[in-house]
Image: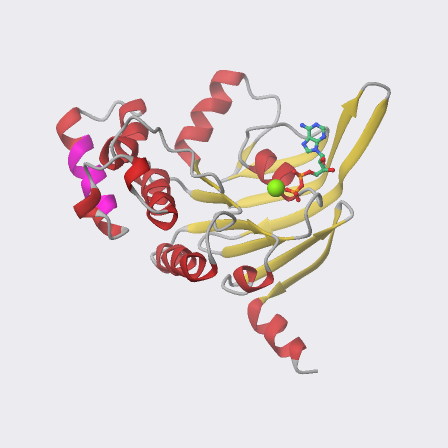
Amino acid sequence: MIEIKDLHKSYKMGSNSLHVLKGINFKVEDGELVAIMGSSGSGKSTLLNILGMLDGADSGEYTLDEVPIKNLSETKAAQYRNKFLGFVFQSFNLINYKSALENVALPLYYQKVPRKERQEKAMQYLDKVGLKPWAHHLPSELSGGQKQRVAIARAMAAEPKVLLADEPTGALDSKTSYEVMDLIQQINDEGNTILVVTHEEDIAHMCKRIVHLKDGVIVEDKKIEQVRAGQYV
Ligand code: ADP
Ligand code: MG
């Protein structure tokens, strides 16, 4: 589903340059649930933004669903982004003056899905995340966990090939974090490929594979069974 080879990224600030990603290689197969873990500032969001085609790399290769993502025009990139990728952020990024239902229906509007079908599908996804009774409420009337559920429903409504979540539990208390991760696991069990960026070990441990980023490189890439086995050595 995803393959990256020798990916590099620097940020230039005046005459200085910060080399954040120093040759990242990895592959994600269809249906995986991968945590990208690392301390704050280790480049997790930078990597996820490149995978999400929100930003470009300086060098390296990126193939998404067999399509090489390089030198794509802005329009083509936007098309692929809408078709292939769903996003969930720490800060939910919901539209405050729209109801939960309208927020979920929004990507379908951009996909030119007819109004009635849009409403039905959005309601179906809200139901999936357990928020049907809250469909006509505004984000301000929802708890943090509920807001993140709406954001997840919105990302899934567009039926992306890959869901990219950047610190999805970063703004939530631990009980709510586990509930949101349960939902992410459930969506993965249904066959969806998901990447979760987190700096929290217990959140990473709810994924099937943990990729550990440090000083711009991957220092560890293990299946959860290997990680668990390693704890007892
Ligand atoms: P993480 O998500 O792991 O906390 P980031 O990818 O956000 O890390 O950032 C990695 C490093 O790059 C940090 O030192 C950060 O300050 C820097 N950085 C991130 N985005 C930018 C940017 N747009 N311009 C300059 N520096 C940036
Ligand atoms: Mg980050």
Does the magenta stretch mainly form a helix, a strand or a loop?
helix
Q: Is residue 17 left or right of residue 27?
A: right
Query: Quarter of the image containing the C terminus?
Result: bottom right
Q: Is residue 106 left or right of residue 62?
A: left
Q: Residue at 42% x, 33% y: name it.
A: 93
Q: Which residues are magenta?
A: 118-126
| Vertical arrangement, residue 10 with respect to residue 151, above or below | above
User: Where residue 68 sits: x, y (%)?
Assistant: 57, 32
Q: Residue at 64% x, 44% y: name it.
A: 44
Q: How is the image coloured?
A: secondary structure
Q: Nearer the viewer, residue 147 or 107?
A: 147
User: Where residue 106 sits: x, y (%)?
Assistant: 30, 28
User: Where residue 3 sits: x, y (%)?
Assistant: 60, 44
Tell me which image quadrant ligand 1 sits in. top right
Q: Residue at 47% x, 39% y: name it.
A: 91
Residue 51: image quadrant is top right
Q: Is residue 32 left or right of residue 139?
A: right
The residue at the far left in this view is 116
Q: Nearer the viewer, residue 221 or 89?
A: 89
Q: Is residue 97 magenta?
A: no
- The total number of labels drawn is 0
The residue at the far front in this view is 141
The residue at the far bottom in this view is 233
User: Where residue 203 sits: x, y (%)?
Assistant: 53, 60
Q: Is residue 119 magenta?
A: yes
Q: Residue at 60% x, 62% y: name it.
A: 201
| Vertical arrangement, residue 130 with respect to residue 9, above or below | below
Residue 55: image quadrant is top right
